Amino acid sequence: MDCEGLETLRIKDQTLTNESAEKVVGWALSHHLILNPEAGSSSRLVLSCESIQYSVTILQAIQNESKSLKKSLKDVVTENEFEKRLLADVIPPSDIGVAFDDIGALENVKDTLKELVMLPLQRPELFCKGQLTKPCKGILLFGPPGTGKTMLKKAVATEADANFIKISMSGITSKWFGEGEKYVKAVFSRASKVAPSVVFVDEVDSMLGLREYPGEHEAMRKW
């Protein structure tokens, strides 16, 4: 596959990674075959500069949209220092980089997530009538390390075009009484401001143990 007159094509302020270059070639190939259907039967395919320029324009539009989204996320008003700490933890869907096709097996789990999480985000009008049709507020994923729990939640956010917020329980806990609760409140406050969003709480089992300890004071209970 060649490109006719590629040396005459000028692209300013554009750095192509291997992944971006593959996308540019793919879009250019599709564009060229749409304009020239008979070219598909040829053993030697020659792309036009017009098709390359078209695909580069698409790439630039996607990158500009991503930059605009990042800027809009940073422009969201923060009410306190706890919300400010979360600025770097909000990942727009275009930057997540994980989809369901990237996850092998787990078909039953993926189907369940699509039904319980993605469908309410994509078709909210179907879940606004009556108590029985209301979507679930959270899902607990459990299993040994390395079984795809984090990837599944990232894929949900990507497929549903939602912002992804990953929170670790070790980052929430604090030696100061009340700090952890304020941080948790800030997490959900921030998530509502950048909705739709998927909040993934990692290591949650470290805070959701048994509460019935002899001599435990109410003030020591976190959840």
Image (cartoon, rainbow, N blue to C red):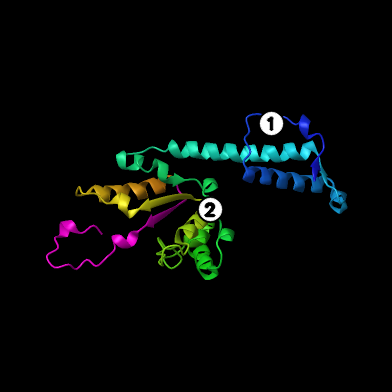
Mark closer to the observer (2, 1): 1
Q: Which mark identifies residue 51?
A: none
Q: Which residues are magenta?
A: 195-223
Residue at image coords 35%, 53% = 168
Residue 78 image position (x, y, % from top left)? 36, 38
* Crowd class of label 2 (few under 14; some 14 to 19; many from 20; radius 10 Å): many
Using the numbered discs, state the Cα–Cα distance from disc 2 to disc 1 in whole angstroms: 29 Å
Q: Is residue 56 visible?
A: yes
Above/below status of 73 relative to 173: above
Residue 155 image position (x, y, % from top left)? 52, 57
- Is 2 on the left or on the right of 88, as rendered? right
Q: Nearer the viewer, residue 85 or 79?
A: 85
Residue 183 image position (x, y, % from top left)? 30, 48
What's under tag 1, amino acid-wise? Answer: Ile
What's under tag 2, amino acid-wise? Answer: Thr
Q: Nearer the viewer, residue 106 or 22?
A: 22
Q: Secondary structure at mark 2?
A: helix
Above/below status of 27 relative to 205: above
Residue 199 image position (x, y, % from top left)? 41, 53
Q: Secondary structure at mark 1?
A: loop
Magenta region includes residue 199: yes
Q: Nearer the viewer, residue 16 or 222?
A: 16
Badge 2 is on which residue?
A: 158
Magenta region includes residue 119: no
Badge 1 is on which residue?
A: 11
